[in-house]
Image (spheres, grey):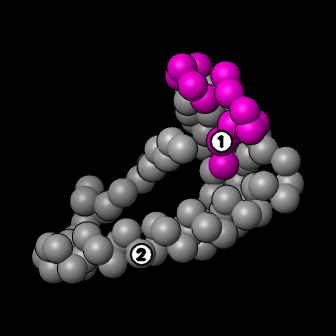
Amino acid sequence: MNNNKDLNEMETTVSRVQAHKGVHDGEPRPGIVIATHDGSVIRSTLYNIQTQQYSTLVTQLAAKGKGVVRDLDPAVAGCSMSKTLSASRFRC
């Protein structure tokens, strides 16, 4: 995060996501992990070990998903940022 605007935007997003039904009303402890494209954690509401595990797994999943999208639509490989995935929601 480069400045206070980015931090405020991130906190607003975390608050908005936490307000969704199902985010904080179950077991095991549900939560939010915000990470960079390379898996570096910026913010998390999980315990440290869970944060690292999810960050690693989701980073791998995102890389595979990116490959699938590229295979399905080769034009995406050289596209602008408007065609990239910026958020994912997983429910178990």
Provide the major secondary structure of the magenta segment: loop
Residue placed at 53% from the left, 22% from the top?
20
Write down the residue under mark 2.
Answer: 64
Residue placed at 41% from the left, 53% from the top?
86
Is any part of residue 42 visible from this angle? yes
Q: Which mark is residue 32?
A: 1
Determine if the magenta segment contains residue 55.
Answer: no
Tag 1's secondary structure?
loop
Tag 2's secondary structure?
helix
Q: Quadrant of residue 13?
A: top right
Please state which amino acid type lies under the numbered disc 1. Answer: Ile
Horizontal and vertical percent for residue 81?
31, 62
Which of 7/34 is in front? 34
Q: CA distance from mark 2 to mark 1?
A: 21 Å
Q: Quadrant of residue 24?
A: top right
Residue placed at 84% from the left, 59% from the top?
49
Which of 1/84 is in front? 84
Q: Is residue 81 above or below residue 17?
A: below
Is any part of residue 2 visible from this angle? no
Q: Give the crowd class for mark 2: few <14, some 14-19, many >=20 residues within 10 Å.
A: few
Residue placed at 74% from the left, 38% from the top?
28
> Magenta region: which residues?
19-33
Horizontal and vertical percent for residue 14?
62, 33
Which mark sits nearer the N-terminus, 2 or 1?
A: 1
The answer to whether 1 appears left or right of 60 in the picture is right
Horizontal and vertical percent for residue 12?
60, 28
Please state which amino acid type lies under the numbered disc 2. Answer: Lys
